[in-house]
Image (cartoon, helix red, strand yellow):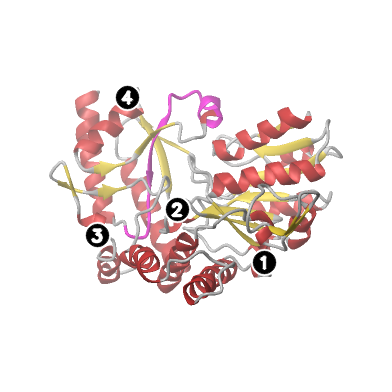
Amino acid sequence: MNNQELQKIRADFPILQEKIYNKDLIYFDNGATTQKPRCVVEKIEEGYYYTNANIHRGVHFLSQKATEAHEAARSTVAEFIHAAKREEIVFTRGTTEAINLVASSFGYAFCKSGDEIIISVMEHHSNIVPWQMLCERKGLKLRVIPMNELGELDLDAYKLLLNQHTRLVSVAHVSNVLGTINPVKEIIEIAHKQNIPVLVDGAQAVPHIAVDVTELDADFYVFSAHKIYGPTGIGVLYGKEKLLNAMPPYQGGGEMISIVTFEKTTYNELPFKFEAGTPDYIGSTALAEALHYVQGIGIEKIAAHEHELLTYGTKRLMEIEGMRIIGTSKAKSSVISFLVGNIHPYDLGMLLDKLGIAVRTGHHCAQPLIDSLGMPGTVRASFAFYNSKEEIDTFITSLKRIVIMLS
């Protein structure tokens, strides 16, 4: 991506022109949430101002128009991740709710006492706690795939964990702490040899790399809009039609019903069976706008630019004495977690903020991983396509000043 293209993109994000403590904002917390281009915010405004009406059940013009936009957004999502059918796309409140939905509904339909669920050591809390809750409810056992010193999952250990009691494997496509791009296609192939379904947490993958759920053969794939330049409060569950049909609804209420009587309720067809209540039809259209924006740039171009930032940022960070980068897998996305000497990550983060640089500190909602590494937390710089090498240079200069001050 040349400088002219980058500046054109940055102009689409008004917040990047903000001043923080009288300094130019440098936003390196994209792993937590991404900033929103003007077109996404305008799409939200347009929806509320001109097409706001409850969808699916209304016969009037506005309801029909809003319904068409919402269902067109579903098709956009299906095309973006290459789902075989638009009916396999369920709108949720985000990655967290999507995983909870599967844990609840799949767990109810397919799991019994003595069964096992496999996750990995590098999972976000959203891909740990729902499975722990299921284990407590139904008497299951949670098994954990370990990793090596580079931050790569141990696939030999993974193969040994699989057995006749394994009901599901649930793993991150990309680690939000380490940046490791996990070999999910291979993980899925290994599980499928024993007819074990796999859920992939794609929250950190979809904004950065091309995802094809059909080619991966994922049984479930989940992600959040706000991490791919869309609005907060909406996300996606992709599930294979056969599995979704076999699972009971997650919640009850309007939209997910076919017929309701006091004696019995019959449920709606996919995907509406899993979408109880009024959906976020404004958010869905804004998510579709964000995906169109990403497609306009090109996910391959985005991946190449972010890889360049990752490589450059890693090289520059290693200039700092005492630097320790956590997660050095060869297959890595645009995340760098690090520590410097004995300086607490919170102190580094607080002082970087005073210089206008937004990074994340702490355990990054992956406390078991951080605990396994014996650390108090890390500083995490996570890049997006609107970031630049010049911002990294300012970040490094600032970090060097802080390290000297705190050492």
Q: Position of residue 355 (x, y in %)?
A: 19, 40
Marks counted in the figure total 4
Q: Is residue 283 above or below residue 178?
A: below
| Secondary structure type for disc 1 | helix
Report which residue position mark 2 lands on. Answer: 227
Circles 2 and 1: CB atoms closer than 8 Å: no
Report which residue position mark 3 lands on. Answer: 14
Q: What residue type is labelled 2?
A: Lys
Q: What residue type is labelled 3?
A: Pro
Using the numbered discs, state the Cα–Cα distance from disc 2 to disc 4 in whole angstroms: 29 Å
| Precedes in sequence: disc 2 or disc 4 | 2
Report which residue position mark 4 lands on. Answer: 343
Q: Where is residue 216 in the image (x, y as percent from the top left)?
A: 67, 60
| Residue at the image position 70 percent from the left and 42 percent from the top | 104
Using the numbered discs, state the Cα–Cα distance from disc 2 to disc 1 in whole angstroms: 23 Å
Circles 1 and 3: CB atoms closer than 8 Å: no
| Secondary structure type for disc 4 | loop
| Precedes in sequence: disc 3 or disc 4 | 3
